[in-house]
Amino acid sequence: MHVLYFHQHFSTPSGSTGIRSYEMAQRLINQGHKVTMVCGSYGGGETGLTNNFVKGKREGKVDGIMIVEFDLAYSNKDSFLKRIVLFLKFAMKSVGIAMTHNYDVLFATTTPLTAGIPGIFARWFRRKQFVFEVRDLWPELPKEMGVITNPLILAAMSILEWCSYHSAHRCIGLSPGIVEGIKKRGISSENIELIPNGCDLSIFSGDIAPWRPDGVLESDLMAVFTGTHGIANGLDSVLNVASELKKRGVFNIKLVLVGQGKLKEALETRAKQETLDNIIFHEPVNKHKLAKLLKGADLGLQLLANVPAFYYGTSPNKFFDYISAGLPVLNNYPGWLANLITENECGFAIEPENAFAFANALESANKNREALSRMGANALSLAKRDFNRHILADKWVAWVAGEHK
């Protein structure tokens, strides 16, 4: 079987972003299938291709994956209009690939929602099998966040969402809320599968040398956030808790923010203005250096803005990286991840927008290192039992290939 795989933000482990698509493609190849990955150029991502672009495109094989990369550079720092234009350009170029290449199954994963466009064309004009993977519910999320308010744009996105779901032979949702959102658009549960992000145990567990950034002492409690510094992440909550800890005279808790994004500069400016020297900002790192960082950390921070659509409608890579590394997790919003943490006693689930409760949880972790160690062991057990990437990838391959029945 030849799978034509569309992921605009694809990266190999050499990059500093999620590698779900890389791992899934590897699983397909290991089972004897062929994969062509179509992507753009993503800030923080690494496709593995180094040859020059020719007429806006370059191709090559990386780790057994045939990659087609368009010269469409994307960054979280880009304006909303620029991002929309890039999404549409990628979708149109992708339609060209979908309409001309030989393949058996077209697989497309969001974000963005425009990823579904080549699948729609492949289904109705070439009668190809189309499998659509949904990582976030659009337009629900941007609407609740207030990022998109224009009713015409929201209506267009809603139509595209409906067309993508109803054109697909099978859908995949990465969280319980996403699965329910797909069902609400009229898709039978028989055609939807829940396959969340998984734990890369081979990368994050085992004999790994720990690493801490400059400014973090061995005796400090190190709480780390790894991910985009954007509107959705609500990282002002970290600065608020840093201020609260400073007021309490607590100086041996360090908050490390690793990543990039639209709001990073503003966050750094605020931290400097308030002399919050208990916060350390660090550039993105690749998966292998991230493994060393998490090995040296005491607590992983799973943080999002207080948007109800996030509660059950996201499947964040960072959470699964944390538990893969045996790190307890502090989560600051309700929902399915908060429930997992509470039920498995593998961290702290606090209410949103409460710097006092956030600080209390950090102080509790700092004063009870033995309990924190037990939480970390529980986190690793959860990773191995329910979220092993290899097991989930086998389930994913069977679903994509239509071999699930």
Image (cartoon, rainbow, N blue to C red):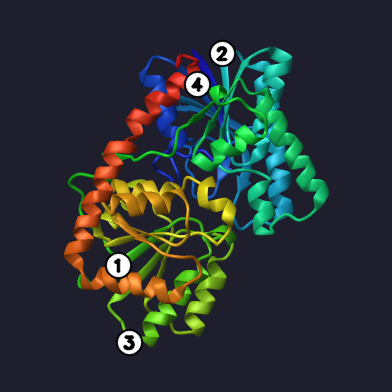
Image point (53%, 64%), residue name: 234
Q: What numbered label is drawn on residue 104?
A: 2
Determine which residue is flagged by label 4: 400
Q: CA distance from mark 4 to mark 2?
A: 11 Å
* Mark pair 4, 1: CA separation: 40 Å
Frontmost of labels 2 and 3 is: 3
Q: Amino acid at mark 2?
A: Asp
At x 69%, y 13%, the residue is 126
Instruction: Tell me which numbered mark, 4 or 2, is placed earlier along the sequence.
Output: 2
Return the x and y of residue 102 as percentages of the image width and height: 60, 13
Q: In the image, which disc is placed on residue 145? A: none
Q: Which residue is denoted by mark 1 in the rendering?
A: 222
Rendered residue at 46%/58% (across/down): 259
The three-letter code of the residue at mark 4 reads Val
Q: Earlier in the sequence, mark 3 or mark 1?
A: 1
| First in residue order: circle 4 vs circle 3 | 3
- Between disc 4 and disc 2, the foreground one is 4
Tell me how far mark 2 sits from mark 3, CA to CA: 62 Å
Q: Reading the chain from its start, which is encountered first: label 2 or label 3?
A: 2
Other-residue count near label 2 (Cα within 10 Å), few / some / many at <14 / 14–19 / ≥20: some
> Which picture quadrant has residue 382?
top left
